[in-house]
Image: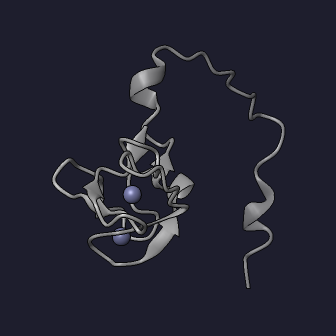
Amino acid sequence: MTIACPQCGWKFRHQVKWICDECRKPFYTFDHHGVCPACGHVHEVTICPRCRVFSMHEHWYRDDDDDKTWGERILRIPKSKKKKKRSQDNPQP
Ligand SMILES: [Zn+2]
Ligand SMILES: [Zn+2]
């Protein structure tokens, strides 16, 4: 799993701390799932240090790197002999 900004893709690293809205103490928000370890304040949104856009904390957790952690996967390959995809028949406006 990757922790990255939903807006610009900036990846979290332990060089940036976020300041608690409540007690103003800096902490690694992704180590504590948005909860301040000092006062327990829950931060539902997290600002990106690069693009300065607030995003929902949950949206920072991405699944797109799961391939590395899942290990082996077995997928069915559908038979594609029947018909071609129709997407070419219906070009988008
Ligand atoms: Zn960003
Ligand atoms: Zn706090």
Instruction: Name the side, left or right, on which 72 lies relative to 17.
Output: right
> Residue 61 appears at what percent x and percent y?
48, 48
Q: Residue at x 84, y 37 (%)?
A: 82
Is residue 93 shown above or below 17?
Answer: below
Q: Residue at x 77, y 34 (%)?
A: 81
Is residue 16 shown above or below 68?
Answer: below
> Residue 59 appears at what percent x and percent y?
54, 57
Q: Residue at x 46, y 74 (%)?
A: 54
In the picture, residue 53 is in which quadrant? bottom left
Which residue, as the protein is rendered here, is positioned at the far bottom? 93
Q: Residue at x 76, y 52 (%)?
A: 85
On the rendered image, what quadrant is the N terminus found in? top left
Instruction: Give 87 or 75, whichever is nearer the viewer.
Output: 75
Q: How is the protein colored in the picture?
A: one colour
> Residue 58 appears at what percent x and percent y?
55, 53
Instruction: Name the side, left or right, on which 66 lies relative to 56.
Output: left
Ligand 2's quadrant: bottom left
Is residue 73 shown above or below 41?
Answer: above
Instruction: Give 17 or 56, whichever is nearer the viewer.
Output: 17
> Residue 25 appears at what percent x and percent y?
28, 60
On the rendered image, what quadrant is the C terminus found in? bottom right
Instruction: Give 63 or 15, whichever is nearer the viewer.
Output: 15
Which residue, as the protein is rendered here, is positioned at the far right? 82
Q: How many marks?
A: 0
In the picture, residue 17 is in which quadrant? bottom left
